[in-house]
Image: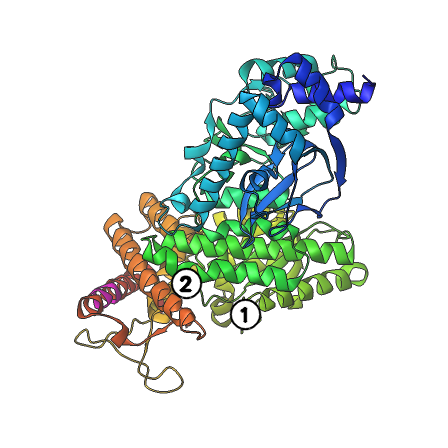
Amino acid sequence: MTVELEEIRDFLAGCAPFSDLPVEALNALPGRLTMRYVRRGDDVLAAGRANDDVFLIRSGLVDVFDASGTLLDRRDAGDHLGYSTLLSREPSLYTMTAVEDAVLLVMHRDVWADLMERHECVARYYGGENARIRAVASSLRSTAAGDALRTRVADLMAPDPVTAGPATPIREAAAIMTERGVSSLLIVDPAAAPADGAHPSGLVGIITDRDLRRRVIVAGVDTSRPVSEVMTPDPEVLAPEVLAFEAMLLMAERGYHHLPVADAGELRGMLVIGDLMRTLHTDPVYATAALSRKASITEIAEIAANARRTVGTFIDRGFGPDEISRLLTANADAVARRLLVLAEESLGEPPVPYAFVVLGSQGRREMGLASDQDNALILDDAYDEAAHGRYFADLAEFVCAGLADCGYPLCPGDMMATNPAWRMTESAWETTFHQWVTAPEPDALLHAQTFFDIRGIHGATALVDALRGSYVPIAANSPRLHAHLAKLAAHREPPLGVFRGLVLEKDGEHANTLDLKKGGTAAVVQMARLFALAAGLPQLGTRERLIAAAGAGSVSRRGAADLGDAYEFLTTVLLEHQAHTAAAGAEPDNHLHPRELSKLERQHLRDAFGVVRRMQQGLAAKYPIHTIG
């Protein structure tokens, strides 16, 4: 047996079901296989194609999609592909695409059939695997699957992650992983200080079995060296309450297979992408994970539209407005990030670090079907307009135009990164926010208040954290800002008449309809923003702001609860209206005709508007609205 065949045999010995073969059969198997190299982005097998082979991944990654393009699974070294066609003798139901360059061991149907007949371990393995993937595909298409969107990282993570110190020899780290039966190891240094950029838990790195193969075995690194030399430093960390679909999108976009989970500075668990893939997810939003493979605006737009089309289905399944808004926002974030990556690939590496930030409803993770785009750029202070201005102008134009093509309308108020006024250095942004906070002007603040919902989604997001850290404490001690924000919130009058009758728009294209946003959801958003800033709180979401503000005493607990309930009802009605409008082929908007509601729903609507009006009336007593013009 040649050295190459011996290496293949050793590889097969570590892969089910071949690890259970008799020695003679295992030794003979490498000579019965061929090898195939597949480049990144190429298909191993396309849906609808006939197939006579089983593929065993020796190296690389391969994604499995159904005929509609929905991501079903991600396969790694040691995983099998193509066997369902051999069992069914039908064309492939799945498309299998290399995520990175892959080397495959190819087993022809005749060899496979011989092994199936001779060895029970092989027959049992392939029969079970086929049944499992069919079950996953069926669950993806079933509208009755239940709580995937509600599943949180805490429900899927493996608790009590295995750790080691940075000085641990590589050989010992590998032994720990083998002994504990895990595919990753967290590297923790208790002496690492948060002030130096370390995670509060002392987490400084992560090493995975993939890292060991690539960075140690292939590279020939001495295994007595410390594991810190080959680990991935400063890994991204998830919170337990993050929703599974948000984690899925993040891991798919960035190529992560493992992410540590931490809460309150303590490591809680490890999330593995395979656990996410196996979660029941009818939810077509999971197809957004395929965005990282798309290179054309048309393809990206179709995936974005797919997520928006599912809103009606999620409403019918009983999902709440918070969950649906987070779904829509996660999709919009993913689309923007993909466009930014494409822009950077086209324009070249950014000349200075920057952060792409989203504002308003996207910043708060509260998007609806009628949301437009609000975004900006924070540039590193090394930015020079003459040298770097064209790059970021072109990047902003590409991304904002792409978002518009993907169904996110341009902002009518021009609050977008294409506006030079909203492309500033970190220092310039700090000066601008300081001006808004300490010496607000009514006209400027009318448009600028949405910037208090700022959230970074791409690039040097530490710039966003620094900016928020600079203005939030000052905002808590700025009564003039509070008064201006209170006045703006009070002017968002609900459409209620003197006797609680619903007041309809009198003329224009929306005549005889209710504006659910202007004096409804937007009024609650503005009050929640005011209460949070007045207390120096960093929360962004409306519900989170109300809860935190009640805890800090800037609004009563009863008032916060009432506003939260009103906001939930108004948002539910608004999303249902937008979903029905979109399903009818019209453009979603915020204007509802009362005939769309039952008598009881109209009563609830009046109650919700009544809560908003009562809370607005209390603003003048709490904040010095009368002191400003």
Instruction: Name the residue rendered at 76%, 58% in the picture.
Output: 346
- Specify whether 409 is left or right of 296: left
Q: Which residues are magenta?
A: 604-609
- Specify whether 578 is left or right of 344: left
Q: Identify the residue under disc 1.
A: 409
Q: How is the image coloured?
A: rainbow
The image shows residue 592 at horizontal and vertical percentages of 33, 74
The image shows residue 350 at horizontal and vertical percentages of 75, 52
492, 201: nearer the viewer: 201
User: 288 above or below 128?
Assistant: below
User: 278 above or below 573?
Assistant: above
Mark 2 against mark 1, which lies toward the viewer? 1
Outermost residue on the bottom side: it is: 507
- Say which element carries label 2: helix
Secondary structure mostly seen in the magenta stretch:
helix
587, 199: nearer the viewer: 587
- Say which element carries label 1: loop
Q: Identify the residue under disc 2.
A: 485
Badge 2 amino acid: Leu
